[in-house]
Structure formats: structure tokens, C-alpha cells
Image (cartoon, rainbow, N blue to C red):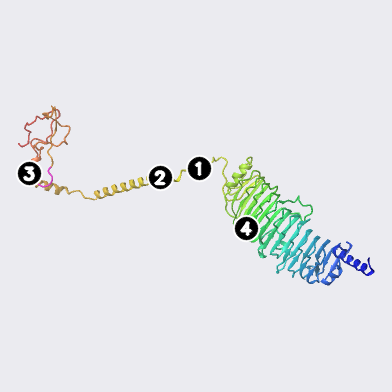
């Protein structure tokens, strides 16, 4: 049986239990909550678990901020920005940290111009429509969005944030932008990124986004699950940009690897992009723009279809072999590079182009194709030169070495014979007067006897008729020619022989052993 005191005690316990477990909604949605201190915030939200409307952190806030017990804010949670002297914007300069340990749902999160902010922690936040964090200060900012899985519009993060990590984020229906400085997002150049600290970008489970823009000094990128980047995917994104994927970076060399990316319209990679890899990407509906600041290669494999490819900057090589469809190809490197591979690819892809429509001797300029690689194009009327047949190295050595040795030996032998002939030519001939005096004195070489050839040869015996047709044959007989006795005599001058000169009249013959006129007896 219940007593009066027991009944009252039970009622109090039930009310306390229900109060601790039931969500208490505060705010009417027409008036925003403006707070300038932790005391004001705690007082206005005392006992509340959900706030209908927005919460504004006043610019006079000083110190850390803790949003206790609130799990849902239907509108925005933001810092105040006002303009000093109608020109310079000033935020909550003395806000040092933001913690919302129980917050799960939020419409808009905007924290900007907080020069002393070091931490933003919303560890249980699961859904948000828009995130805007702009921290352009010297002190580094740390983030904790470990449970955020869905973003209905865009995520825009800029400033000195060494690591941007969203370990549970799967989907961003608008733009996902990370930059070293907010001014770099819409800039036309990437060089200023080197003036800021590096940023590690980590989205390990992100699968879809409308846009992905990484600008400034990007140190690393981890997005192994990203599959889709397309403007047609999101219906409420920040600003319409021309690139689905834009990575403009300065600083250390960046490797861009998106292993599952397969759906995208446009890509722009500029700056210190050392390499890129999109192994699942076969089609680009729009353009691929590549402009490296350091030496890099452009290899689109396995890409097959694209509308426009524009390559420039510090390009060392390129590979277009996998392409099967392309409407526009532009190559404008900073230094010399051969245009021949590009021309061959263009002929394969667009065989109907006009070969005569090239600009000058240093550029290819066809309809849809331009290559400023400083290489003279091939004339249409010139036949393609066939390459010289390749010979195996072993066969070349086997034939070449013996041939070389043969020609070397022939050259040596020719020079040797030439030198020997030159040495012989240098030997002076004997003195004629001295030789004749030596012979007159009985010394020197004795000239052989002369014997004319005889006709009428019978067997092995010579004939009796001498033929005077060969006066050069030496004779074996002891007889001497006319004038011999005078030539080898005592050296006195002799007159002419009575027998004449020894000539035989034409038609006459000389009989063997017959005495010769004017000749002495033997």
C-alpha cells in the first residue's frame, strides 16, 4: 500500500529520469542566439538538447567555447564577422578553441577570422549541409570531424591547417575544397602556394563529390576510395568551377594517385605535380590540363576517350598510346620536346586532318592539333624513310672484326712495300766512267758473249743460219762481237774497223765458222 511520502518520492524520480532521457527542444526558429561568453551560452541553453535556429559567437568572445548537451542545431553555428572602419573585416580574435562533444546534426558550420583559434572538435557530428573554415593565421589549427559521413552541400577549408582529415566522410554533394589560403581558390596561378605551410589531405573513405579542389602547398593526398567527381552529381554546390578535379600545388613534389576514380569530366593538374596515376579512368568527358613546374612526364594510360588534352610546362616526355578518341590536342612545353609521337597519335586518331595546314618550320598547326615542340614537320610529298635493317650485335661483331683486321693488315703491307721502294730509290747508281775504267783494266763484271739465234734447227743441234731478228740472246761461243778487241785493248784509241759496223746487208746470211771481214781470228 502506497503511503503519501512514498508516492511523492516515486513521482520525483520518474520526472528526473524522464528529464535526463528526453530531448528538450529550445528556440522558436525566428530568433538567433547571440552569445559573447561561456556563461551566456550555458545560461541560454540550460537544459536544452536541441536548438531550433542559429547560434552566433560574438566577436568579443575570449577563451575556449564548449557547447554542452546540444545534439542538434537546425540552422547555423558560426562566428561573428564585422567590419572595422567599414573596410577591414574582424572576427572573433580571442576565441581559442571550439568543442561540441554531443553535436550530431547541423545545417551550417562557419568559423572564420579567428586569429588565436587552435582547435575545432566536433567528434560526433554525422551530418552537415555546409562547412566553411577559414584560418589564415600563423598558429596551426587542428580538426576533429571523426564521425562526419555526409555533407549536403560543400566543404571549404583554408588556412594553416597541417592535416585535414575526415576519416568517415563518404559523400560531399557539392565542392570539396582545401587550400593554403582562401585567396588561392579563385587565383589564376599556383606559385603563391609555396609561401604557406604544407597540408596533408586525408579522406580515406570518400567515394563521391561534385568537385575536388586542392590548392596551395599540398604535401600529400590520400583518397583511395574516390570514384566519382562530377558537376552533375551535386545539386547544391558552392561555386560553379570549370574543373571537376583541380590540384594546383607548390612546394615539395606531389604524387597524385586516385586508384578508383572512374567518372569525371575535367582535370587540371598544375605546379609541383611530380606524377599522377588514374588506373581506373577510361573516359574524360571534358578536358585534361597538365602544367608541371618541375620535370615531369605525362602518361594518360589507360585513358581512352577525351575531348581536349592540353599539355605545357616543364614536360620531359608524354605517352598518348592508349587514346582512341580525341578532338583537341595541344602541346606547348617550356623546352624542346619531339612532336613526332604526338603527330603519329593525331594521325591515328584523326586521319582526315589537313597535312598542309601547319604554321611554320617550328610548329605543327592542324585543325584541332597544335604542338610547339620546335621540330620541323614532315612534308607531305616526302616519302617515309625506311629504317635500315637491324643486324644482331653478335653478327655485326663477327663480321666487322675480321674485316677490320684484313684492311689494317693490307694497309700495313702496302706501307711496308712503299717504304722499301723509297729506300732502294735512295741508293745512288754506279759511276759510269769508273765502271768502264775498271772493266778496261780487267776488273769488274765481264759482259756475256753474244750469239745470234740460228735457224734450221734439227733435233737438238743448232742450224747453220743465223737469224738477225733477236740481238739480245747471249752466245755460248768464245767469239766476240766486232770492236770487242779494240774496246778491251791496251787503251789506245782505235780507228774504225775495215769491216764496217758489223751490219749484215738485208737478205744476206752468215755461214757458220766463216771468217768475218775486219775481225781478227780467235
Residue bounds of the magenta highlight? 442-446
Q: Which numbered circle lies on residue 293?
A: 4
**97 w.r.t. 386: above or below:** below
Residue lying at 6% horizontally and 45% vertically, measured from the top left: 490
- Left or right of 455 in this view: 85: right
Residue located farthest toward the front when viewing the structure as drawn: 1
- Left or right of 485 in this view: 49: right
Quadrant occupied by the N terminus: bottom right
Sequence-first disc among 3 and 1: 1
Answer whether residue 282 is visible to the viewer in this image.
Answer: yes
**518 w.r.t. 378: above or below:** above
Identify the residue position indicated by label 1 in the image: 387
Whole-Å distance between the Cαs marked 3 and 4? Answer: 110 Å
Give SS at disc 3: loop
Q: Which numbered circle lies on residue 489?
A: 3
Which marked residue is nearer to the observer: mark 2 or mark 3? Answer: 2
Q: Badge 1: how crowded within 10 Å, few (<14), some, or many (20+)?
A: few
Q: Badge 3: how crowded within 10 Å, few (<14), some, or many (20+)?
A: some
Identify the residue position indicated by label 2 in the image: 398
Q: Is residue 324 magenta?
A: no
Q: Is residue 445 magenta?
A: yes
On the image, the x and y values in percent for residue 265 come to 71, 49
Amino acid at each position: 500500500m502506497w503511503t503519501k511520502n512514498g508516492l511523492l518520492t516515486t513521482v520525483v524520480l520518474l520526472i528526473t529520469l524522464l528529464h535526463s532521457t528526453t530531448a528538450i527542444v529550445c528556440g522558436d526558429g525566428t530568433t538567433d542566439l547571440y552569445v559573447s561568453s561561456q556563461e551566456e551560452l550555458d545560461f541560454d541553453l540550460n537544459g536544452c538538447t536541441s536548438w531550433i535556429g542559429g547560434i552566433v559567437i560574438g566577436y568579443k568572445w575570449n577563451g575556449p567555447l564548449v557547447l554542452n548537451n546540444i545534439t542538434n542545431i537546425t540552422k547555423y553555428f558560426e562566428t561573428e564577422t564585422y567590419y572595422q572602419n567599414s573596410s577591414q573585416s574582424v572576427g572573433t580574435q580571442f576565441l581559442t578553441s571550439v568543442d561540441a562533444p554531443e553535436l550530431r546534426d547541423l545545417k551550417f558550420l562557419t568559423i572564420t577570422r579567428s586569429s588565436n583559434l587552435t582547435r575545432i572538435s566536433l567528434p560526433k557530428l554525422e551530418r552537415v549541409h555546409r562547412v566553411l573554415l577559414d584560418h589564415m593565421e600563423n598558429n596551426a589549427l587542428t580538426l576533429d570531424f571523426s564521425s562526419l559521413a555526409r555533407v549536403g552541400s560543400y566543404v571549404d577549408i583554408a588556412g594553416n591547417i597541417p592535416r585535414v582529415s575526415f576519416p568517415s566522410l563518404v559523400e560531399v554533394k557539392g565542392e570539396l575544397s582545401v587550400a593554403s589560403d582562401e585567396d588561392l581558390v579563385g587565383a589564376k596561378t599556383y606559385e603563391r602556394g609555396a609561401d604557406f605551410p604544407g597540408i596533408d589531405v586525408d579522406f580515406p573513405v570518400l567515394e563521391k563529390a561534385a568537385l575536388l579542389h586542392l590548392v596551395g602547398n599540398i604535401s600529400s593526398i590520400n583518397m583511395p576510395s574516390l570514384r566519382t567527381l562530377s558537376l552533375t552529381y551535386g545539386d547544391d554546390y558552392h561555386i560553379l568551377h570549370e574543373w571537376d578535379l583541380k590540384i594546383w600545388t607548390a612546394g615539395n613534389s606531389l604524387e597524385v594517385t586516385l586508384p578508383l576514380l572512374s567518372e569525371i569530366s575535367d582535370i587540371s593538374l598544375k605546379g609541383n605535380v611530380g606524377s599522377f596515376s588514374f588506373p581506373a579512368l577510361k573516359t574524360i568527358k571534358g578536358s585534361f590540363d597538365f602544367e608541371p613546374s618541375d620535370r615531369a612526364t605525362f602518361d594518360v594510360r589507360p585513358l581512352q576517350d577525351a575531348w581536349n588534352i592540353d599539355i605545357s610546362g616543364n614536360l620531359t616526355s608524354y605517352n598518348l598510346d592508349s587514346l582512341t578518341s580525341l578532338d583537341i590536342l595541344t602541346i606547348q612545353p617550356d623546352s624542346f620536346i619531339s612532336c613526332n609521337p604526338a603527330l603519329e597519335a593525331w594521325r591515328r586518331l584523326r586521319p582526315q586532318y589537313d597535312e598542309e595546314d601547319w604554321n611554320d618550320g617550328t610548329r605543327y598547326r592542324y585543325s584541332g592539333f597544335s604542338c610547339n615542340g620546335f621540330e620541323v614537320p614532315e612534308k607531305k610529298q616526302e616519302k617515309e624513310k625506311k629504317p635500315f635493317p637491324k643486324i644482331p650485335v653478335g653478327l655485326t661483331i663477327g663480321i666487322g672484326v675480321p674485316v677490320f683486321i684484313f684492311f689494317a693488315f693490307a694497309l700495313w703491307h702496302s706501307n711496308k712495300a712503299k717504304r722499301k721502294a723509297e729506300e732502294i730509290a735512295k741508293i745512288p747508281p754506279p759511276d759510269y766512267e769508273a765502271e768502264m775504267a775498271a772493266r778496261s783494266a780487267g776488273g769488274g763484271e765481264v759482259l756475256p758473249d753474244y750469239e745470234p739465234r740460228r735457224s734450221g734447227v734439227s733435233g737438238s743441234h743448232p742450224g747453220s743460219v743465223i737469224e738477225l731478228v733477236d740481238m739480245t740472246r747471249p752466245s755460248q761461243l768464245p767469239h766476240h762481237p766486232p770492236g770487242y778487241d779494240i774496246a778491251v785493248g791496251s787503251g789506245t784509241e782505235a780507228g774504225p774497223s775495215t769491216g764496217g759496223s758489223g751490219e749484215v746487208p738485208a737478205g744476206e746470211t752468215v755461214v757458220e765458222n766463216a771468217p768475218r771481214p775486219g775481225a781478227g781470228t780467235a
